[in-house]
Every structure is written in structure tokens, then in C-alpha cells.
Amino acid sequence: MSEIHNANELLDIVRKVSETIRGEKRNSLRIECMNGLGVYGTHISVDSKFSKWVNGLTHESMVVPASQVYEVRTTGFSPYPQTIKGNITRTDGKLVIDLKPALKFDLFSIEISYRMDDEFLKGLVSARSSPEPLSDKVKYELSAQLRNPEGLELGFSEVEIEEFPVSARVQIAERINMNVPDYVKDLLKVETQLLNERNPHASKKVIELQSQKVRLLKKLGKASLTDKIQDLSLLLTPSRFINYVKTIEDFKLHQCERGTDFFQALGMFQLPKSMNVISRTDLNLKKPAAKGTMVYESKKFDEEIADLFK
């Protein structure tokens, strides 16, 4: 299935639909960001018998490219509400909407849902997340704004952008390295030296390394080093890390994701360098811009890493 790539493609479809039926029309656009859908809707008022007769003669059906359409809904509202079914057919790569059942109503709507790609959303909305490090936290200024609300108003009386995502990248690799105790790093060095020791006559050196290892393991307690690293990795699961962040004002916290870049923590364990925190907001023609703040409690994160090794 192909996708709508920009607002101009969608406006072309709007013009074609508007030209198909004579009557008073109110066009709307709803972007469902969570579903990747753009829903174009038009409410059409055809309240005279003559207009219905003319429309029935000249425009008894509407044809759109089937490859771009995800779903079509036709609904009658007046004189009574009814969902119109069975009026959609696909043939030769085209989707044919039979309008005759809708023309029985004085007021009806046609909703056509299209798959929207990421480039479409980027062309529609500009977004930013700017970090500001503080002593015990990192504050991210979030913003999202319709790029061209005036242009959208030319084609639509209503525009709703639902749950537009703004991502903030939280860097964690340095904080992990800073808060792991030195004795843990020393223990890893000793274990690495023992593994790499190949000289059969270096028994004295091996004994010294074993002695250091025993001393360092006492500081670690009953748990093994692998257990401690697994506990650290659990702090970085999305469901746990989200407890270190919160949003203020126009944005609501949605989810956390592990970053795609990894580093060798303590020389041997792979952990993500960063976490992506996704917040969402709604935009429309009356409120074309949103501003908010995301706060990352870096000190709390530091303390919980340090507590793992006590």
C-alpha cells in the first residue's frame, strides 16, 4: 500500500472529492499519529430534491486510487443516523464509492483514511527537544508547531493532529560509568588479567591476583558481579526508566525506548548509550503550537546505580 507523502497530495484528493458532489461541504482532516493514519472527512449537506436528482444523474459514484486508501466510511446523519455499508468496491486498482445510498440523506459524511509516512508528519509539524543540564536533573524544552496553518485552512475547516510525538534523547553512558564504584572496575581488571594469563610459571602473579579478587569480592557481598550488572540492566528497561522522567504543560509522557547505539559497560557488558523518551501532544487550527518541559531526574538515577553496588 502506498502512502500519502505530503499535504499537497492530500489537498488534491480533497479537491477531487469536493468537485464530485454539489452541496454545502465542510472538510476536515484528522491525523492519528499513533495509527499512522490521515483521515479526510467531508460533511455534505444536500437538502433539496432537485440537488439530489442532479447529483444522482451526474455523480452517482466517486473513484479514488485504491492503493492509497486504508479505509472508507460513509455515514448518514439527517433525517436519521445510519452507517452506510456495502457501497465500496475495488476494481483495477481503483476504489469506487457508490454515492446513491448517501444521497437519500440531507446530511451525510464521507471519511477516507490514508496511510501517512513519517515524511508527511515532518512536513506538517516542526518539533524540537532542547536539553538544559541542571545540578540534579536535565530539563528538556519541548515544542511542536504546525508549519503552515494558513495553508491548511485553505482546504480544511478543521484540522486535528492527535498525539504528535516529540522524542528526547537522554544520554546515560557517562552517568553509568561515573556511578559504578572503583572496586567493581578493579575486580573486572583482575578477572581479565586472570583470564589472559597464559604463562605456566607465573604462579606467584596468579596467587596475587586471586588474593586481590577475593578481597574485592567481599566488597561486592553475596551477589555475583553478573547479578549486579543484570540489576543495572533492569534499570534501563523502558518500564523502569520512565520513572526517572516526567512532563509538564502541553505534553504527556508516552513511553521510553532503548537507544540503538550500545557501549561496553565496564569493559564487557553491552548497555545502551541513551534512552529515547517520547512525549505526545495535540495540535489544531485554534491551537497550532504546543510548548512543554520534560524533566529527567539524573540525580535519582545516579543514586540508584550507586545503591546497586552497596
Image (cartoon, rainbow, N blue to C red):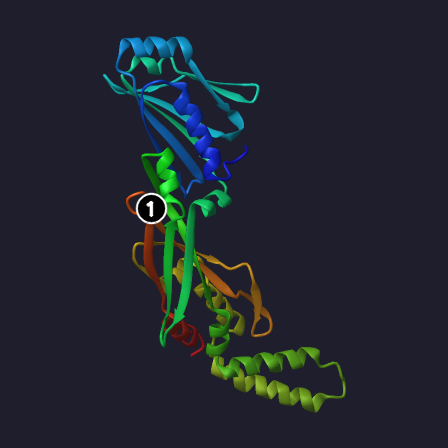
Q: Amino acid at mark 1?
A: Leu
Q: Nearer the viewer, residue 58 or 94?
A: 58
- Residue 47 in the image: x percent, y percent? 26, 15
Looking at the image, residue 45 sits to the left or right of residue 129; the answer is left
Q: Quadrant of the C terminus?
A: bottom left
Residue shown at 46%/74% (left/top)? 175
Q: Nearer the viewer, residue 186 or 203?
A: 186
For disc 1, the marked residue is 283
Name the quadrant containing residue 124: top left
- Residue 49 in the image: x percent, y percent? 28, 9
Residue shown at 35%/34% (left/top)? 156
Looking at the image, residue 113 sits to the left or right of residue 188; the answer is left
Q: Residues within 10 Å of mark 1 (few under 14, many from 20)?
A: many
Residue shown at 40%/8% (left/top)? 57
Name the quadrant containing residue 121: top left
In the displayed structure, 113 sits above or below 274; it is above
Q: Nearer the viewer, residue 156 or 69?
A: 156
In the displayed structure, 310 sits above or below 162; it is below
The secondary structure type at the circle numbered 1 is: strand
- Residue 187 in the image: x percent, y percent? 56, 81
Residue shown at 45%/29% (left/top)? 13
Looking at the image, residue 166 sits to the left or right of residue 109; the answer is right
